[in-house]
Image (cartoon, rainbow, N blue to C red):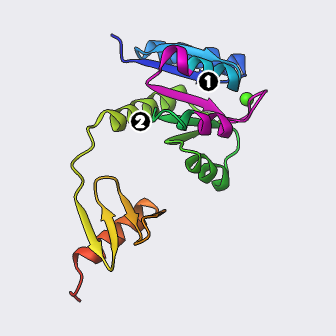
Amino acid sequence: MDHGSVLVVEDDPDIASMLRLYVERAGYRFHHASDGAGGLAAMQDFAPQVVLLDIGLPDVDGYAVARSIREHSDVPILMITARDTETDAIVGFEVGADDYITKPFSPREVIARIGAVLRRASDPMPQSETLSAAGHVIDLGRRQVLVPSGEVVRLTAREFDVLVYLVENCGLV
Ligand code: CA
């Protein structure tokens, strides 16, 4: 069964071949690039449904690749990182990554994450319901808060839920 194609941008041949095994077994077509330039070329050639992107690449780092991809594509990006720090995760999200996986990872985890980002990507965006409070717009479908200037405020999932709860219960004790 064909579930779509996965592009893996990873310079470590052992990790790449392990990923190939599990990605193909899970029913995805597998494309591999071993550096950032190859990854961007493969984006054009294969138009994958999801990209697994290593941060430490021989030419440019994964963040730069993610930024380039985001200039023309909304494809889900999973960053593969060896560094387990919050800063890396935040940088990953700022460049447009959808999720990240920390090395060493289990292949099962990778397949589960691929499935999760693909489900999110294929869900038709619900006609977004919005709330407004003091000139701020809270977009429930996109889970975004826009300040009056139109800028998006970054909130954690928990912060967002608390905010929505407070606005929906405005005026109640
Ligand atoms: Ca690497």
Q: Nearer the viewer, residue 31 or 137?
A: 137
Position of 129 with respect to 81 (left or right) is: left
Q: Residue 102: in sight, yes or no?
A: no
Residue sitting farthest toward the right: 58
Q: Residue at x 47, y 27 (%)?
A: 50
Position of 130 with respect to 34 (left or right) is: left
Q: Nearer the viewer, residue 112 or 149?
A: 149
Q: Residue at x 24, y 53 (%)?
A: 128
**Which type of secondary structure does the marked residue at label 2 adopt?**
helix
Q: Is residue 49 magenta?
A: yes
**Which type of secondary structure does the marked residue at label 1 adopt?**
helix
User: Whole-percent x and y of residue 74?
Assistant: 45, 36
Contact check, label 2 and label 1, Cβ < 8 Å: no
Residue labelled with disc 2 = 117
Q: Quadrant of residue 113?
A: top left
Residue 20 against residue 111 in the figure, above or below: above
Which of the two marks, 2 or 1, is nearer to us in this view? 1
Residue sitting farthest toward the front: 149
Q: Please rate how many residues cluster around mark 1, counting C-alpha atoms within 10 Å: few if below 14, some from 14 to 19, many from 20.
A: some
Q: Nearer the viewer, residue 73 or 98?
A: 73
Q: Quadrant of residue 79?
A: top right
User: Whole-percent x and y of residue 120?
Assistant: 35, 38
Ligand 1 picture quarter? top right
Q: Is residue 41 magenta?
A: no
Query: In the rendered structure, which amino acid carries the disc numbered 1?
Result: Leu
Q: Quadrant of residue 69?
A: top right
Q: CA distance from mark 2 to mark 1?
A: 20 Å
Query: In the rendered structure, which amino acid carries the disc numbered 2?
Result: Val
Residue labelled with disc 1 = 40
- Magenta stretch bounds: 43-68
